[in-house]
Amino acid sequence: MIQVAYFAYRDYYVKFEELGTGEGFADIVYFPKQGKGVPILLVELKWNKDADTAIRQIKTKGYAEGLKDYGTDTLLVGICYDKEGREYECRIEKYSKS
């Protein structure tokens, strides 16, 4: 099922890795294809930390602000992977444009 979801994104999004925005580089940004009506997905990945740290980095470095002119909603996605425990944590938050 995960493979289906992963490949289905291509119908809705264009993916960019290490996209320069704000004060750094967002790990992954999924921009909606025109007319699809889905939000931008701004993804930050972390090792051995937590998903809140990833979300905080997106906000602190201003990644979402650099994308605000695209005129669509933005979801902030923080994903953390614990190498030793092999556990994942994910947090998704809607970005509020100021």
Image (cartoon, rainbow, N blue to C red):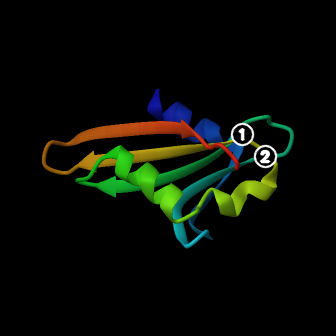
Q: Is residue 79 above or below residue 23?
A: above
Could you tell me which residue is drawn at 80 percent across and 57 percent down? 69
Q: Earlier in the sequence, mark 2 or mark 1?
A: 1
Q: Is residue 36 above or below residue 23?
A: above
Could you tell me which residue is drawn at 59 percent across and 61 percent down? 63
Task: Give the residue at mark 2.
Answer: 33
Task: Give the residue at mark 1.
Answer: 11
Q: Position of residue 8 (x, y in %)?
A: 62, 36
Could you tell me which residue is drawn at 77 percent across and 44 percent down? 72
Q: Nearer the viewer, residue 9 or 50?
A: 50
Tell me the kind of residue under disc 1: Asp
Apparent side of residue 50 relative to residue 24 in the rendered image (left or right): left
Apparent side of residue 48 relative to residue 54 in the rendered image (left or right): left
Considering every residue shown, the one lying at the far front of the view is 98
Tell me the kind of residue under disc 2: Lys
Could you tell me which residue is drawn at 55 percent across and 45 percent down? 76
Q: Are marks 2 and 1 in contact (CB under 8 Å)?
A: yes
Q: Disc count in the image?
A: 2
Q: Nearer the viewer, residue 61 or 11?
A: 61
The kind of secondary structure element at disc 1 is helix
Q: Position of residue 57 (x, y in %)?
A: 44, 59
Q: Position of residue 6 (x, y in %)?
A: 53, 39
The kind of secondary structure element at disc 2 is loop
